[in-house]
Amino acid sequence: MFYTILPQWPLIKPRFERIARFAPLVGVLIGFSQSFFWLVLKYFDWPNISIALITIAISICITGGLHIDGLMDTADGVGAGPSKRIEAMKDSRVGAIGVQSLVIILILQIAAIIKLDFYAPFAFPIAAFWGRLSQIFAIENYEYIFNKEFSSIHQKYWRGISKEIRPSLIIIFIGIIFFLSSTNLNLSANLLLIYCISSGVTTSVLIPHFINKLLGGHNGDSYGAGLVITETTNLLLLSIIFVPN
C-alpha cells in the first residue's frame, strides 16, 4: 500500500489512480521509522556504520526495493544508449551499470548518515519527503517514455500540480510551524530553514529534469530513480549544513 509492502490501513481505502499525491507523506513516515530505529540503536551504543546500514535497509525493506529497482533499470537504460534504452529498461536482468549505480548510492547514503550522526533522525524524514516530491514534478512536467500514445496511470488521472501538491504543501507548512516553535527565531535558525526548503525544492525539480534529458521522458523506473537520487542528494546537503566541520 502507498508504494510499500505494508498492508492496507484500517478505514483507509485509497484510490491508486491518484495515490502519487500522498507519496511525500509516506516518505515522511518512512523517514520517521528510520529515525526511530536510529535512536534505539544509538541508545544501545551501536557504532554509526552499523546504524547507517540498518536504517538504509529499513527503508529498502518497507518499500520492497521498488525505487532501488527503478534506479538500477534507469541506469542500465542510460548506459545502453538511445537505440537500446527501452529494451534495457524493460529487461528484468540487472546490468553492470545498474549495479554500479546502486553501489554508489549506498556509499553516498552511508557517508552522509555517518557524518550527520546526531542530526540523522532529523534528516531522514526531510530527505524522504523531498525524494518523493520529485515524483510529483516528474509526473507533471514530462511525458511517459515507454509508449508515447499513452500516459502513465498517474498522468491519466492527474488533476494538475496545483491540486496534487496540496498534501505536500500542508506537510511543509506543518514542518515550518514545528521548526519555528521549537527553535529560537534567530538568524542561523532562519537560514537553516531557508536552506532546507530551497535545497529540497531545487533538487526535487532539477533531478527529474536531468533524468528527462538523459532518457527523453519518464516512466515508473525513472520516477523511482529520481526519488532515490533526490533523497541521497538531500542527505548529503543536510550533512553539509548540519555538520559543517
Image (spheres, grey):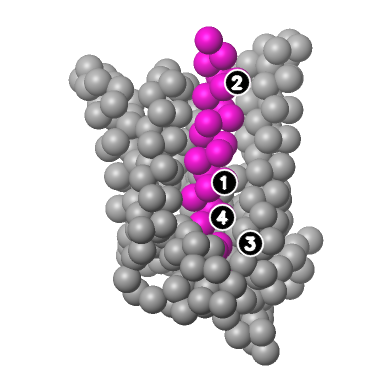
Name the spot of residue 121 as percent of width and height, x first: 44, 29
Q: Are marks 1 and 4 in contact (CB under 8 Å)?
A: yes
Q: Are marks 2 and 3 in contact (CB under 8 Å)?
A: no
Name the spot of residue 192 as percent of width and height, x first: 67, 21
Quadrant into which the N terminus falls: bottom left
Instruction: Mark 1 or mark 3: name the one nearer the start of the chain.
Output: 3
Work out whether residue 211 or residue 242 is closer to the camera in this orientation and state it: 211
Q: Amino acid at mark 3?
A: Leu
Residue at x-position 57% and y-position 46%:
230
Residue with the mark numbered 1:
230
Query: Start and end of the magenta stretch?
Result: 218-245
Type of secondary structure dominating the magenta stretch: helix
**Residue 106 visible here:** yes
10 Å neighbourhood of mark 1: few (<14), some, or many (≥20)? many
Residue with the mark numbered 3:
214
Name the spot of residue 227 as percent of width and height, x first: 53, 53
